[in-house]
Amino acid sequence: MGKKAREIVEISVPEIISDLNRAYADEWLSLYLFWYSSRTTINSNLKLIFEKIYLRDLKHAELLSSRIKTLGGSIIYNPSEMIRIGNCKYPESINSKNEKEMIESLLSFKRCLIEVFNRLIKKTHGKDFITYGIVQEIIKEEIEDEEILESIM
């Protein structure tokens, strides 16, 4: 990150890196939940929906990791660390034999992600324009994912 870019960020860079790493962990956990669900459901329509969502989560994780690195941070490597620092409670299990329960678990995780990114939007608005733009893009897609999941309940 260049000198001027560092100057215009009006928020603690270590704090925003920490927040982004927590959101990055949440996106990876969401990605895995949707990937796992796409592989264990017997409903071919759900499989396609879950695949679309986990690919979006991968894109979100990539956007977040790129921003973390640009800000001078390091991304989390260890999955157990992701569960430990993530904002969203990772479900104990996903019942692939009960579609309604499975979708409810996934929907709960997505709603948590929306809260996470809403907090980041408020925190970065007018203080870190690049992070703000990235988070705006991500929350838009998380809201779309929530709507998709609600429509199949």
Image: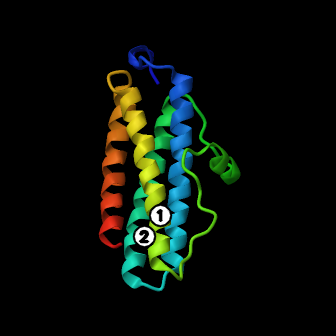
Local secondary structure at mark 1: helix
How many discs appear?
Answer: 2
At a point 42% along the width and 84% down the height, the residue shown is 43
Q: Is residue 76 above or below residue 97?
A: above
Circle 2 residues within 10 Å: few <14, some 14–19, many ≥20: many
Relative to residue 46, is residue 32 drawn left or right? right
Q: Are marks 1 and 2 in contact (CB under 8 Å)?
A: yes
Q: Is residue 107 above or below residue 74?
A: below
Q: Where residue 80 sits: x, y (%)? A: 70, 52
At a point 63% along the width and 48% down the height, the residue shown is 82
Residue of label 1: 106
Residue of label 2: 50
Q: Is residue 41 above or below residue 132?
A: below
At a point 61% along the width and 36% down the height, the residue shown is 74
Relative to residue 19, is residue 124 drawn left or right? left
Q: Where residue 21 sits: x, y (%)? A: 56, 39
Q: Where residue 25 sits: x, y (%)? A: 57, 47
Out of 108 and 134, give the one closest to the viewer. 108
Question: Which of the marked residues, 1 or 2, is nearer the chain's N terminus?
Answer: 2
Q: Which amino acid, mark 2?
A: Phe
Q: Where residue 91 sits: x, y (%)? A: 59, 61
Q: Which amino acid, mark 1?
A: Leu
Q: Is residue 104 above or below residue 110?
A: below
